[in-house]
Image: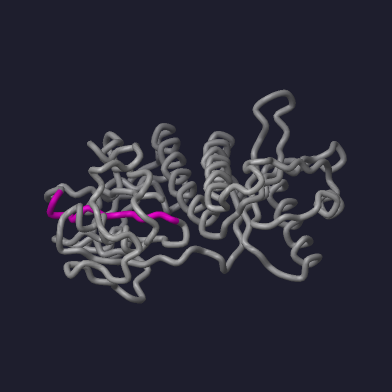
Amino acid sequence: MAWVGRPATDEVPTGRAGASSLDPGAKLVPGRTDPSVSGGKWTTKAYVTAGEAVCYVPSIQVGQRAQWRQEPFLGPVGEDVRVSIRKSRWGDPTRRYRMTVEAQLTEEEAAEGARRAGLRAKAKVRRYARANALTRLWTLTFDDENLPDDRAGAMRAGAAFVRRLQKLLGRTFPYVVVVERGSKGTRRLHVHLAMGFYVPMDTLRNTWGQGFVYAQNLGDRGEDERKVASRVAGYVAKYVEKSFGEVAAAGRRRGDHRYEVGQGFQPAMEVVEDQGDEADAFRSAIALVGDGLPTYVWSSEAIKDWLGPPVRVLRW
């Protein structure tokens, strides 16, 4: 497909970037938190500050076998059971369903569940980091005296560090904390911290107090802030996805958190419904984000046996 996994070209629907209004066939849906994947409408979720939009394919265009009507779903009843979900009618892909526990998950199903959960978390963290212009990334390590016993201990240490830093600075701020296990040598746990402003290294080291602090330079002086934030977002999203695989392999325990973000800074979402075709949905996304043509467009058709609702993802 022309859109999949490649920068946008002349084939992208044209339109006046940054237009103040949508095309006549589009309708904004105020106050909605989830899209309506209804019979004849393209539905677009636009995360304007994150420079991203997700367009949902109308169900009538994929026929009566639409994946979101009935499918195996890995969760939410723990991580070791298989449940089936049947929608009561066409509509929102995450609501109005009946759930039935079927059986224990196989190892393959559990691994697939962790992979899919990691991809969802990866997308959320990427949008959060871009929307909040997180341009700084640090790695916090543990010395022998403070080495945590497990991932949960490392997460608690990272979260406590942020609380101390917020108290020291006298304010809250958006951030991402994620734990990673090194791939070489001792495979020691360490913490990655992304924030949107500069903090002197001495302040970070003294506030951390459990090992070394390393700054990861992901941008050049004078470089566009949005490009740097996109780069940092990509890194922390990758760490989050990796953490899901590591936790799944080791066996998750209650209290194990893969990552943490500052609350109250989640990117706002706008929802619009289109009666037209894919090109109209793309035009609506461009009008909402208002930042020219997208540089990357991805289709769920690129994934064999895609289990979620068919979508197109646009990024700027």
Residue found at the very far bottom of the displayed protein: 31
Residue 297 position, x and y percent, is 33, 44
Magenta stretch: residue 7 in it?
Answer: no
Magenta stretch: residue 56 in it?
Answer: yes
8, 269: nearer the viewer: 8
> Left of 241 or right of it: where is 172?
right
Tell me which corner region of the image, top left, top right, bottom left or bottom right, holds residue 16.
bottom left
Quick check: can you spot residue 89?
Answer: no
7, 307: nearer the viewer: 7
> Left of 209 or right of it: where is 309?
left
> Left of 63 or right of it: where is 231?
right
Tell me which corner region of the image, top left, top right, bottom left or bottom right, holds residue 260.
bottom right
Above-or-below relation of 208 to 304 = below
Residue found at the very far top of the displayed protein: 185
Residue 106 position, x and y percent, is 40, 34
Q: Which stretch did the figure color magenta? A: 51-61
Which corner quadrant holds the N terminus?
top left
Tell me which corner region of the image, top left, top right, bottom left or bottom right, holds residue 214.
top right
- Rendered residue at 30%/36% (across/down): 303
Q: State the count of labels.
A: 0
